[in-house]
Amino acid sequence: MSEEIKPNAVYTTLEAQQLLKISSSTIKRLLKKGLIKANKVGGQYRILGKEILYLLSPVVEKQATQSYLKLKQKVVDKINRW
C-alpha cells in the first residue's frame, strides 16, 4: 500500500527517498542537480510535498532525460578526444 504525498507537508530526505523508492545517492543527486528543491534546516534538507509531486510529473522526467543525455554526450566527447 502506497502512502499519499501531501502537497503542503514537509518531508525529510529519508521520507522523500522512501516515498519515491530511490536510494540515498539518487536523492542527493536530485538535490544537487536542482531537480528537486529543498531548504536546509539545522544542517538537514526539508522538502515540500509539492516538490516531490512536481518531480513525478512528465515535464521533470523530460528535463532529467535531457540532463542525462548532455552528460552522456560530454563523456563520449571526452573519450573520443583520447
Image (cartoon, helix red, strand yellow):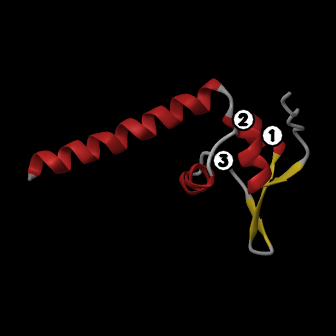
Indicate which disc, 3 or 2, sits on the residue closer to the N terminus: 3
- 18 or 46, nearer to the observer: 18
- Residue extending farthest top: 58
Observer-nearest of 14 and 40: 14
Residues at discs 1 and 2 in contact (Cβ within 8 Å): yes
Vertical arrangement, residue 57 with respect to residue 39, above or below: above
**Badge 2 element:** helix
The amino acid on which the numbered mark 1 sits, given as a three-letter code, is Lys
> Image point 64% across, 43% down: which residue?
22
**Residue 80 occupies quadrant:** top left
Q: CA distance from mark 3 to mark 2?
A: 8 Å
User: Residue under circle 2?
Assistant: 54
Q: Residues within 10 Å of mark 1 (few under 14, many from 20)?
A: some
**Rendering quarter of residue 19:** top right
Q: Is residue 34 left or right of residue 41?
A: left
Question: Residue visible at 83% across and 43% down?
Answer: 49
Q: Which amino acid does the dot numbered 3 rest on? A: Ile
Q: Do callouts 3 and 2 mark residues in contact (Cβ within 8 Å)?
A: yes
Res 28 → quadrant:
bottom right
| Labels 3 & 1 near each other (Cβ < 8 A) | no
Q: Amino acid at mark 2?
A: Tyr
Residue 69 % position (x, y): 37, 36
Give the numbered dot on residue 62.
none
The residue that appears at 84% across and 30% down in the rendered structure is 2
Q: Residues within 10 Å of mark 2 (few under 14, many from 20)?
A: some
Within 10 Å of disc 3 (Cα), the crowding (few <14, some 14-19, many 20+) is: many
In the rendering, at what x and y percent does residue 41 appear? 80, 69
Q: Which residue position holds label 3?
A: 36
| Front residue of this view, candidates 18 and 30 | 18
Q: Earlier in the sequence, mark 3 or mark 1?
A: 3
| Left-right relation of 25 to 37 | left
* Residue situated furthest bottom in the rendering: 42
